[in-house]
Amino acid sequence: MMVSTRGRYALRVLIDLAEHNSGSYIPMKDVAARQEISLKYLERILPTLTKAKLIAGVHGKGGGYKLTRAPEDYTVGEILRLTEGDLAPVACLADGAEPCVKASDCRTLKMWQGFYDMTNRYFDSITVADLVNTDSADNYVI
């Protein structure tokens, strides 16, 4: 599995909004500058986050974005599944996949299912608050 810039940048946006949360809306140009991400690219990610109600946005003077929940209520798994799609390592395990005709004889299905379960459990065990609260020695680089 390869996480794209879309997934990594979505995580960085949510972490930045959590770190700078004062209860008011934060201009996305400020987030883009702090994270060194193109504002145009962020403008392509924001609608996905807004539609899923992970962030709320207001246009105009005093506008910007803010989290809709506490940082500990966002999991990395939720964010990655939203921005990347299903985290399944093989097509037959993907959400909505047609049942594989070879599943009953597949010698690798159990291995792939274990990897898939492990990946989801791992990412679902990390919250945005965890990423905000990491010290520099345990810093996650995304």
Image (cartoon, rainbow, N blue to C red):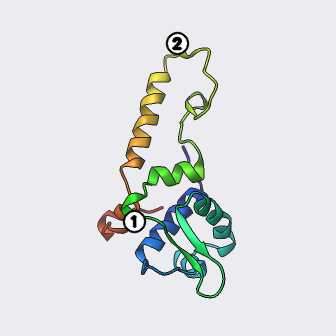
Between residue 82 and residue 35, name the one nearer to us.
Answer: 82
- Residue at the image position 44 percent from the left and 26 percent from the top: 111
Name the kind of residue labelled 1 in the image. Answer: Ala
Residue to which mark 2 is pinned: 104
The image shows residue 114 at horizontal and vertical percentages of 42, 30
Nearest to the eye among marks 1 and 2: give it: 1
Residue to which mark 1 is pinned: 70
From the viewer's perspective, is 59 left or right of 127? right
Marks 1/2: CA–CA distance: 43 Å
Between residue 142 and residue 32, name the one nearer to us.
Answer: 32
The image shows residue 64 at horizontal and vertical percentages of 58, 78
SS for tag 1?
Answer: loop
Discs 1, 2 touching: Cβ within 8 Å: no
Q: In which quarter of the image is the N terminus?
A: top right
Marks 1 and 2, the one that precedes in the sequence:
1
From the viewer's perspective, is 21 left or right of 102? left
Between residue 141 and residue 109, name the one nearer to us.
Answer: 109
- Mark 1 is surrounded, within 10 Å at the Cα level, by few (under 14), some (14 to 19) or many (20 or more) other residues, namely few
Name the kind of residue labelled 2 in the image. Answer: Ser
In this view of the protein, can residue 3 be seen by the observer?
no
SS for tag 2?
Answer: helix
User: What is the quadrant of residue 38 in the picture?
Assistant: bottom right
User: What is the quadrant of residue 41 in the picture?
Assistant: bottom right
